[in-house]
Image (tube, rainbow, N blue to C red):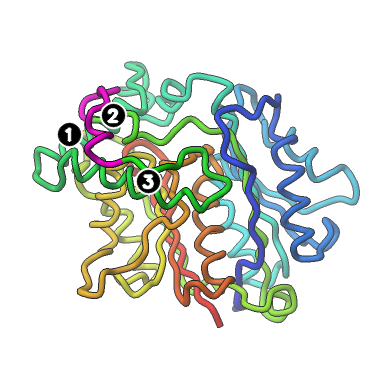
Amino acid sequence: MNQVAVVGFAQYPNVPSAGTTSGVELLVPVFQEVLADLAMSKQDIDFWCSGSSDYLAGRAFSFVNAVDAIGAYPPIVESHVEMDAAWALYEAYVKLLTGEAETALVYGFGKSSAGQLRRILALQLDPYLHAPLWPDSVSVAALQARLGIEAGLYGERDMAEVAAASRAAARDNPKAQVSGVDSPDTLLKAPYVADPLRAHDCAPVTDGAAAVVLAAGDRARALRERPAWITGFAHRVDSPALGARDLTTVPSATAAAEAAGLRGDDVDVVELHAPFTHQQLLLTRALGLGESDGGGARINPSGGVLCGNPMFSAGLSRIGAAAEQVMSGRAGRAAAHATSGPALQQNLVCVLEGA
């Protein structure tokens, strides 16, 4: 099996509305940036793989439209997953691991501003019992948050502290949509949007896109002085039926972390894909983070998705942001997490290391 590494990452600025009609306008500058950084051309990419959603785009085969961002010539080898592009990266990783390709470009995009995101995400629910009731995504998350509070796992102040820390960290992230200095006391004075969630507990509605370049073996070493080698990669899934699982635990995240070789605080940095503050607290517990006496890993130095949540590329961006920490030498070992589905139903963990 080949060694596979992340060698490049770029993302579109997280914005409330990109004002475009498709993903093409979002993706073209992202492709240009990531390829220019590596002195590569589109012809140097052996395999392209994307993640997006027809539900979000409001049309069938929306990813075909986005292929226009690559161009009609020369012919390409291409694939697509109907979920966050972190899972597309997994497909590309396997392609390189088995020697079927030497380089791959993985991209994700989403224009959440085009519709009512809270209602659209109800289509991720069980189609027979839950989806016909149209419970919106924030209300489903609020049920999970309330269960955690009543179980004594955290309180509303803990949730506000997560939001305050994320906004403070995002001040150093020029691509962040939300950033600033807000005390938990100030945040707790805001009204509920869905009890016990306030606005700061919920990721904003965001348009955006991201791209990651993978390379194998010596090609990775030639493209990047310090590649972020993927040393563990796994994903697991819990039941889609909300009543069939304990929403205060995330067993699929724990199982994915164990399969990927993530052991609590044995990493310097972790980028978590937690669209709600209480979900960051649940994931921290599920992954065993913050349990060491040394203070543990830095969580979401980018600010995380609470400061910008482009659907179907936010998980991929977590991998890109963690890889940047390794490639720059700021971290020796980093981990990234991505989620999909209601209330942390599906979870993916990727572990990256320097030389």
> Is 309 situated left or right of 276 in this image?
right
Q: Which amino acid, mark 3?
A: Ala
- Residue 274 has which mark? 3
Q: Which amino acid, mark 2?
A: Arg
Sequence order check: which comes first, mark 2 or mark 1? 1
Which residue is tagged 1?
A: 146
Q: Is residue 179 above or below residue 136?
A: below
Residue 355 x/y as whole percent: 56, 83
Label 1 with label 3: CB-CB less than 8 Å? no
Asked which secondary structure carries label 2, the reply is strand
The residue closer to the viewer here, 223 or 67, is: 223
> Is 197 situated left or right of 118 in this image?
left
The residue closer to the viewer here, 60 or 19, is: 19
State the image quarter where residue 80 is shown: top right
Residue 172 x/y as whole percent: 51, 53
Residue drawn at point x = 54 percent, y = 65 percent: 323
Q: Which amino acid, mark 1?
A: Arg
Asked which secondary structure carries label 1, the reply is helix
Sequence order check: which comes first, mark 2 or mark 3? 2
**Residue range corresponding to the magenta coloring:** 183-196
> Is 25 situated left or right of 173 in this image?
right
Q: Is residue 320 above or below residue 185?
A: below
Q: Select label 2 or label 1 by which is in front.
A: 2
Query: Among all residues in the image, which is located at the extreme top?
Result: 133
